[in-house]
Amino acid sequence: MLRELLPTLGFIHERRIIHRDIKPNNIMRRLDGALVLIDFGAVKQMRPQNEAVAEQTISIGTQGYAPPEQLAGHPRVSSDIYALGVIAIRALTGIPPHMMEQDPDRVIWCGSRSYKNMSSPNYNRFWRG
């Protein structure tokens, strides 16, 4: 999944666009087996890097997949990477985002909490055709 979708994110990020709503429902498998990112209705065009003004935006994204800075109205390129990482963790463990422990610096998806085995239905959906 990551190998297929990270190049897509690289492509849109090089054009200074942030998707802002990466979640499982916005990842589809084409008939040829390739994964594609859909629903670009919440995209945000980033300002040029030389502008010093910090731009606040409307909070857009799906709870659990959007990182705290995005929910606070400050999306960054890393916001899309965060969301894709949460999807990968869910696909591997079966843990939905709302059950992952979080603090401001990280998502804790293993440790004291028990989690489902690696054969979750999501794993097969994302890694196998």
Image: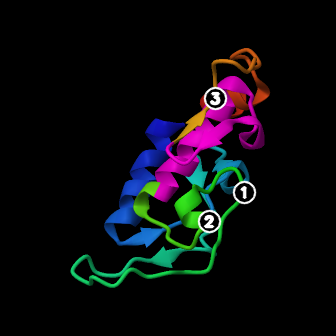
Horizontal and vertical percent position of residue 57: 55, 81
Residue 99 in the magenta stretch? The answer is yes
Q: Nearer the viewer, residue 118 or 11?
A: 118
Q: Nearer the viewer, residue 103 or 59?
A: 103
- Residue type, numbered disc 1: Gln
- Residue type, numbered disc 2: Leu
**Extent of the magenta region:** 79-105
Residue 87 can be seen in this image: yes
Disc 3 is placed on an element classified as: loop
Horizontal and vertical percent position of residue 22: 61, 56
Horizontal and vertical percent position of residue 76: 44, 64
Secondary structure mostly seen in magenta is: helix
Q: Earlier in the sequence, mark 1 or mark 2?
A: 1
Q: Which mark is residue 109?
A: 3
Quadrant for residue 45, please give it.
bottom left
For label 2, the crowd category at 10 Å Cα-Cα, with few meaning under 14, some 14 to 19 and many 20 or more, is some
The span from disc 1 to disc 2 (Cα, nearest Å) is 8 Å
Residue 20 can be seen in this image: no
Q: Earlier in the sequence, mark 3 or mark 2?
A: 2
Q: Which residue is mark 1?
A: 63
- State yes or no: discs 1 and 2 in contact (Cβ < 8 Å): yes
Q: Which mark is residue 17?
A: none
Q: Which residue is mark 2?
A: 71
- Residue, far left: 50
